[in-house]
Image: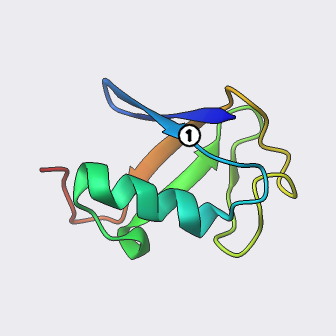
């Protein structure tokens, strides 16, 4: 499956498995945006719920082609 992660005017398409944790997705994003997972927060657009790092995508009802919003901790910027 894949999910779409949006930040401002940029969308990242992330290939993933439903059994992966949110932290795994943040680590994949880290290689794309050069921001450590600790600075990232993923929000499921359909429910506005912040995704828990320790839970799987499946447990948080993230489905194929889901749209997530990426926010960064205050004071950090994308390079």
Spot occupied by residue 41 in the image (x, y as percentages of width and height):
50, 59
Residue depicted at x 19% and y 50%: 78
Spot occupied by residue 79 in the image (x, y as percentages of width and height):
12, 50
How was the colour assigned to the protein in this rendering? rainbow
Between residues 1 and 6, which one lies in front from this camera angle? 1
Q: Is residue 29 left or right of residue 23?
A: left
Residue depicted at x 63% and y 62%: 22
Residue depicted at x 79% and y 35%: 63
Residue designated by label 1: 15
Q: Quadrant of residue 72?
A: bottom left
Spot occupied by residue 29 in the image (x, y as percentages of width and height):
39, 53
Residue depicted at x 74% and y 32%: 46
Between residues 22 and 75, which one lies in front from this camera angle? 22
Q: Quadrant of residue 1?
A: top right
Between residues 38 and 24, which one lies in front from this camera angle? 24
Of helix, strand and loop, which one carries label 1?
strand
In the displayed structure, 47 sits above or below 74; it is above
């Amino acid at each position: 499956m894949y999910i779409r992660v949006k930040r401002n005017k940029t969308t990242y398409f992330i290939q993933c498995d439903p059994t992966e944790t949110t932290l795994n997705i943040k680590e994949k994003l880290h290689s794309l945006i050069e921001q450590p997972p600790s600075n990232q927060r993923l929000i499921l657009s359909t429910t506005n719920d912040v995704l828990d790092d320790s839970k799987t995508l499946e447990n948080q009802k993230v489905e194929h082609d889901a749209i997530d919003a990426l926010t960064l901790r205050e004071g950090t910027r994308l390079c």
